[in-house]
Structures are given as structure tokens and as C-alpha cells.
Image (cartoon, rainbow, N blue to C red):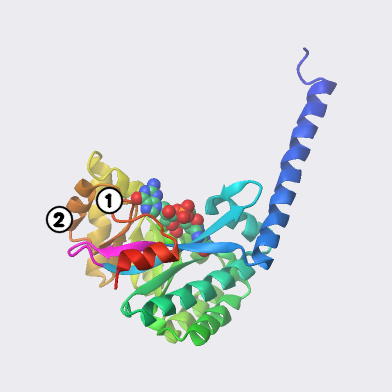
């Protein structure tokens, strides 16, 4: 058949309509899940490398759609951001994570902290500050047991407003960490602009730590940078003992990854923590 003809055009339009229809349907399913409290959180252990002890947990949002099955956060978080649902979703995540941490504290794991991911959009109208305060008050967890993970995209937005929100968050006593460190264009610039508590080295560098000397050099550099700035440093995506071992040699403080534990449902986490 002739290319670019009428049939091709109709086919392209149909495909496009299918895609945008599917997107609209997904959006409305997500709204429904959010309104009916059917999202849930899993928690991935964060461990101290020297001892293997679980010191904290990262809350990771999960959506099991009744029709489509599990939808990954890399799909529904951007969808929530683009369709104005991220504030509500983010507020729900903060409340739920704080409440579930409080339950773990009551069960005797009272040194544990929870890390929650924040997206740039949650900063845009400044609502995040009130949401964090509310989660702290309602759950009763100590502020220093809540850590907020920010990516570079947060800091790329309007400088002064974001900085002011970060300072106010810090004044509440919560911890702030930089997520996916090394993947952005100006990872180093924001270390200068704000006093973070922790750097999380992106898993893309950690994964090839053993085989790729360049990645090894980058990881070594980030660890020594963090330590000399007095920051905690965590390596993400640790999948093997060999990588964990190498990170210990490099004096990396904390790690996270399938080698230690996958993200777990709250019941499984409680079991894993014991007591
Ligand atoms: P992230 O914050 O970088 O979270 C770490 C991701 O790496 C998680 O994927 C986790 O399951 C995965 N992971 C952990 N250990 C390993 C490992 O050893 N190997 C490999 N290959 N992967 C590992 P997940 O749960 O699919 O989340 C993807 C992203 O979605 C997160 O990346 C985060 O950016 C976003 N996200 C998840 N939950 C939330 C949320 O509640 N709010 C916001 N704003 N974003 C969220
Ligand atoms: Ca994270
Ligand atoms: Ca990350
Ligand atoms: Ca990531």
C-alpha cells in the first residue's frame, strides 16, 4: 500500500485515540483508587553496611488495579503529577507511612525511621509543609524519624520558594536526602545551596561497581564527598554480596537493594524485623 495515504492516517488517528483513551481511563482508575483508599505502601529496608542492621525503611507506593493488575510507580506517579492528583497522593503516602511507622515504634522498633519520596509538583503550591506537619502531629512520630527524599527535579523549580520550603521542613526537625544522586545535571550544585542530611547514590552507578572502573571511581568519589561534607551516604540497588563488600571497603555507610531485602508489605516487614 502507498505510504502516507488515507488509510495510514486513519490508522494513526485510531492508534492515537486509543492511547489517549487508555490514558484517560487509567487516570480515572487512579482517581478512584485514591478516593477509595486502595493504594498501598511497601517498605524496603535500609541497612547499615557495617552491621547489616535495618536502620530505616523507604515507603514505596503500590497500585493494584482490579483490571490491569499491578501498575508500576514509574507509570502512575508521573500520571498523578500530570493530572493534578499528586498532592492528594503525596498527602496519603505521608499519613500512611507515618502511621505505619508509629505502629512499628509501638511494637518496640523505636529507632527505625521512614523515608518518603516527594515529587517536585508537591512543592509547587507549598502544600507539602502543612502535609508533613499534619502527618507528624497525627501519628505522633518524632520528626527526626521522618526522612524526605527529593530528586533534582524538586530543586530545578523556582529557587527561592523551594529553598524557603526546605528550610521550613528542616526547622520541623525532619531529615532531607537527595535521591538518585549523580543522575541529574547539577547534582553538585545543590549540595552547595542546601544542607541535606543524606545522599543516595543512584543504582545505575552501584550496579556496575565491580565491572566498570569508571563507575567505581564515581561511586568512590561520591562517598568521599559525602563523608567530607559530614553527610550520610547510602548506595541504592545493591544486588550482590560482592557489591555490598566493595561498598564496605569504600566506607559507604548505608545500603539498600534486593541483596538485603525487596520492598515488603507491612506484615512481612514486621516479621522480618522480629520481636
Ligand atoms: P526510587 O525512589 O529511586 O526507589 C527505588 C526503586 O528501586 C524502587 O522501585 C525499588 O523497588 C527499586 N529497587 C530497590 N532495590 C533494588 C535493587 O536491588 N535492584 C533493582 N533493580 N531495583 C531496586 P519502585 O518501587 O518501582 O519505585 C520506582 C520509583 O517510583 C521510585 O524510585 C520513586 O521515584 C517513585 N515512587 C515510588 N513511590 C513513590 C511515592 O510514594 N511518591 C513519589 N513521589 N514517588 C514514588
Ligand atoms: Ca527514593
Ligand atoms: Ca532512588
Ligand atoms: Ca529513581
Q: Earlier in the sequence, mark 1 or mark 2?
A: 1
What is the secondary structure assignment of the residue under circle 1?
Answer: helix
> Can the viewer see residue 4?
yes
Give me the residue at 78% from left, 21% from top.
4
The mark lying in front, picked from 1 and 2, is: 2
The response on whether ligand 3 sits within 8 Å of label 1 is no
What is the secondary structure assignment of the residue under circle 2?
Answer: helix
Q: Can you identify the residue that label 1 sits on?
A: 218
Q: Which residues are magenta?
A: 44-53
Residue 90 lies in magenta, yes or no? no
Question: Residue 248 or 213: which is nearer the viewer?
Answer: 248
Quadrant in the picture for residue 17: top right
Q: Position of residue 176 (x, y in %)?
A: 40, 73
Give residue 249's mark: 2
Vertical position of residue 16 compared to residue 43: above or below: above
Q: Give the side of residue 28 with respect to residue 178, left or right.
A: right
Amino acid at each position: 500500500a502507498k505510504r502516507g495515504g488515507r488509510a495510514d492516517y486513519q490508522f494513526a488517528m485510531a492508534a492515537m485515540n486509543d492511547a489517549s483513551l487508555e490514558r484517560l481511563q487509567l487516570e480515572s482508575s487512579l482517581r478512584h483508587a485514591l478516593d477509595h483508599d486502595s493504594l498501598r505502601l511497601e517498605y524496603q529496608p535500609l541497612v547499615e553496611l557495617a552491621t547489616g542492621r535495618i536502620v530505616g525503611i523507604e515507603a514505596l507506593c503500590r497500585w493494584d488495579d482490579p483490571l490491569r493488575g499491578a501498575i508500576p510507580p514509574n507509570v502512575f506517579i508521573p500520571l498523578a503529577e500530570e493530572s493534578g492528583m499528586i498532592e492528594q497522593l503525596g498527602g496519603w503516602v505521608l499519613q500512611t507511612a507515618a502511621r505505619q511507622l508509629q505502629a512499628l515504634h509501638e511494637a518496640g522498633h523505636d529507632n527505625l525511621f521512614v523515608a518518603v519520596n516527594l515529587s517536585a509538583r508537591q512543592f509547587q503550591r507549598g502544600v507539602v509543609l502543612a502535609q508533613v506537619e499534619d502527618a507528624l502531629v497525627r501519628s505522633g512520630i518524632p520528626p527526626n524519624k521522618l526522612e524526605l527524599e527529593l530528586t533534582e527535579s524538586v530543586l530545578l523549580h523556582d529557587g527561592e520558594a523551594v529553598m524557603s520550603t526546605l528550610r521550613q521542613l528542616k526547622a520541623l526537625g525532619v531529615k532531607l536526602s537527595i535521591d538518585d544522586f549523580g543522575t541529574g545535571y547539577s547534582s553538585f550544585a545543590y549540595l552547595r545551596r542546601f544542607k541535606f542530611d543524606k545522599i543516595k547514590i543512584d543504582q545505575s552507578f552501584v550496579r556496575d561497581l565491580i565491572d566498570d572502573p569508571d563507575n567505581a571511581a564515581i561511586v568512590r568519589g561520591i562517598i568521599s564527598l559525602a563523608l567530607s561534607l559530614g553527610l550520610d551516604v547510602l548506595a541504592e540497588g545493591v544486588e550482590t554480596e560482592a557489591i555490598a563488600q566493595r561498598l564496605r571497603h569504600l566506607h559507604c555507610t548505608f545500603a539498600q537493594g534486593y541483596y538485603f531485602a525487596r520492598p515488603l508489605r507491612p506484615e512481612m516487614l514486621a516479621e522480618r524485623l522480629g520481636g
